Image: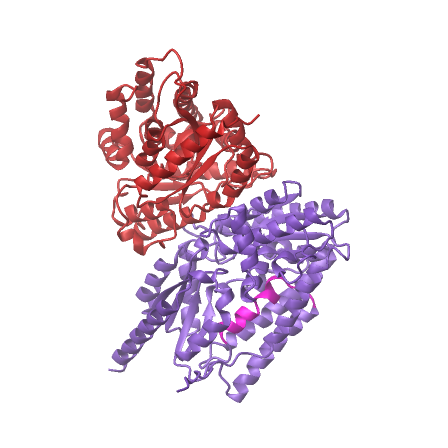
Amino acid sequence: MSELHAPSLATLRTAADDPVSYAQNWKDTHRRPVIGSFPMNFPSEIVHAAGALPVIVQESKTPITEGRSMLAEFYCGYTRSVADQAALGELDVFDGFVAADHCVQLLGAVDAIRYVRPEKPVHFAQFTSAMDDAWTKPRVDSRIGDLKTEIETVVGTAVTAEDLARSIGLFNANRRLLRRFYDLRRSGLIRITAGEMQLLVKSSMVMDIEEHTSVLETLLDRLVLRDQAPDDLVRLHLSGHFCHAPKPEILDVIEESGGLVVDDDLYTGYRYISTDVPESDDPLKALSTWYMQRNINAPCPTRVTSKVDWDTYLLNSLAESRSVGVVVLMAKFCEPHMLYYPELRKALEEHDVPSLLIETEHEGIPVETLRTKMETFIERIRRHSAPVPA
Amino acid sequence: MSIATPRDKTNRLSSTRVGGKMTADYWDNIFTAKERGKHVVWYNGSALNPIFQAAGLEWCHGEAFAARLAAQHLEEPAQAAGSEYGYIGELCSYARTHLGCAVLTQKNVNERESGVVGMLDQQELAAKLPAPDFFVNGYAGCSTGQQWDAMTYRVFDRKLPIFNVSIPMLWGNKPDAGYMRGEEWNEASTYVEGQLRELVKFLEQQTGRPFDWDALSESMSYIKKASRLRLDAMELCTLAPTPATYWDWVASIAPINFLPGNQALVDYFAGVKAEIQQRIVDGVSAVANERYRVYFDGIMNWNKLGFLTRKFAEYDVAVVAGRYTHESFWQEPQLIDVDNPLRGMGQHYLLCPLNHGLKNLQELLLKRLDQYSIDGIAFHSTRTCRAMTNPQSMLAKAAERERGVKSFVFEGDVADASFYNDELFDSRLEAMLEAIDVQRMKTMV
């Protein structure tokens, strides 16, 4: 039984489960364009400031059909799904598409959109991914400037500094609220399941931000806090899974096996809401500052840097949340994750933190096999008297 | 009853053996770099080697070494070391082979500060790389390439300096965008040129010596000459039957991609061109009974080179050109200003065939189909190389739609033989050749 306000949760679920219908309804109501973007570093504030609805395109639940002739089978589920949705016309609600990340598989999917929907504007604002160089921020400033111009052209509205500052304020407020839920979950004074937390974040990626904030405020108002955290469950951290949300049934099995997910670094999770945009005098430059800063707050394996490490960040997170085990969720064929995973494993082993790797696929994974693995993992932790890294 | 061995219908160039010897010598030299007190840079992606050459460094290209191991069927120890370290088999097989080498190298460095690693086990070529003093990455068009070196940096305990050249993709946002034209091209050229100037400063810091700009100009003058000779020789292969094939150009990748810019490089390509010219005079073809002219899209399976060379020829197919061989490796020498080479160098790095959006790739493919009178395309669906595989299905459709050119797809990989399936290859190639025959008959009617 969920401890969150059911009607509010249902509102978020409706949007998160079917973002395209939500976007179509919004478009019909507001008579304004809808712009599709892609993970993991797109500044939605610009689209909002132009008066359009920014929507991060989500993986569809349906099997890949037409998209099979667009991208090879060894692409991640998200990119194959995006190509499939485009080929089937399911993304036609969008008036344009914008991307900022340079993942080679993602670019293949976005190129597929250009191929099947040549009439749609598709803009690539490539944010430099090497983060330590003197020219990175000026370059990203420039890409964001181009992005703004492109969005203004597609939407037909000029974005003023005041518009953008207001949008930044709204998105920051939303992120702050979501982080409040994370704090409460870590404290143990409220049980928010991993599936529910995903719902809170995923819906923020696709909904009108003011409407979403309003629902979050209602949820917070209706919370009933416990006196103390339960001590019979194994506190877990979920790690990985970029771009798209892990399937809720996987999250359910993790918790049904005796785990209590208290933190994560998933993209459809804490990674997405980790960082606010500075509310400074120059809102455009603030967006590139946000881009740089979020890689420091939650280091990302798709960025290149020698100043911060995901493994160090993960160990610190475990200490803060008092998690005693890590479930690594890896989307099959996700190269950044495959590349970084050995470093995570090495760091966790060095600190004697139990971890379990679960590879996920668009087509799903056998849930009962997963349940056996998870139950064994939980049992292993219980016997292990796992220390929290210092 | 004895089974007759099929006649080998290939006729490879003999001049490329010189390139093979030059490349072997190059690697032997690399293996002793530390003994000679040289600074070693490990790099990936673009051909930054002329800059390293001018800086007095020894340079070790990760992809090239992975490809070499695979071509010699010696990749398994490195891949096993990578797998044991935790790299999953669906990861780029270049990266996982090279990272496996890094793991072995680092292990040996820790065990023995000998300079040359693998002293304990010299037969394992995978462990012979000299440990790097620093890393440079300049990977165009493939996000994995950049992250690969970020991980190599971590395998070496995050202690060695690393420099990243960020090469933006030629995506084609603007209406005027195209191959070597438009605002995007000019703007990206300036951006990369600026970073190369910063790279030179970084190298000066690492070596403690001022950069030798004259040496860079000199090496680029050789590369420019070699490139022109290579392109002239390729152009001669537009004749049918072709005097040399794609496989000869594959054999010439190492020299043009990472060997030193010097007179030997020029002599090598002069030799290749001369042999091809002589073949034309003598009426010698590269494939006996050439009946089909095929274009190869994808990076080759390095551990299947000889096998595929013979296989295509068995079917009277001359593979005459390919995306990797013909759209890479100093292929636009007119861009190089030997007195001020950095801009032209940066522009070549941008022109990597992985670094274009579909629009540019389609333009390039159609040009080559016309130039070489192509009948069919072999799309190597390169299992762990998403960058090369990205646009293939759309390119196949464009070739059929725009030129009526048939194609087939076969699975394989750059450095992992396990993804290749011979039965599927045969049936798909045969199906394409049959479709070409039917098309020809219809044309005759």
- Which residue is the extreme one toward the front? A383
Counting from the top left corner in percent of width and height, residue A298 is at: 50, 31
The colour applied to the residues of chain A in this rendering is red
Counting from the top left corner in percent of width and height, residue B242 is at: 47, 79
Q: Residue at x 35, y 42 (%)?
A: A97
Q: Within the image, what quadrant is residue A240 found in?
A: top left
Counting from the top left corner in percent of width and height, residue A365 is at: 32, 43
Q: Residue at x 26, y 35 (%)?
A: A18
Q: Which residues are magenta?
A: B245-262
Q: Is residue B340 visible to us here? A: no
Counting from the top left corner in percent of width and height, residue B71 is at: 54, 66
Q: Nearer the viewer, residue A13 or B68?
A: B68
Image quadrant where one finds the C terminus of chain A: top right
Q: Within the image, what quadrant is residue A261 found in?
A: top left
Q: Is residue B127 left or right of residue B139?
A: right
Q: Nearer the viewer, residue A179 or A20?
A: A179
Colour scheme in use:
by chain
* Residue B80 vertical position relative to residue B238 in the rendered view, above or below: above
Magenta stretch: dominant secondary structure: helix
Q: Residue at x 54, y 87 (%)?
A: B281
Image quadrant where one finds the N terminus of chain A: top left
Q: Nearer the viewer, residue A358 or A182?
A: A358
Q: Is residue B254 magenta?
A: yes
The colour applied to the residues of chain B in this rendering is purple
Q: Residue at x 35, y 13 (%)?
A: A225
* Residue A53 vertical position relative to residue B123 in the rendered view, above or below: above
Q: Is residue B279 visible to us here? A: yes
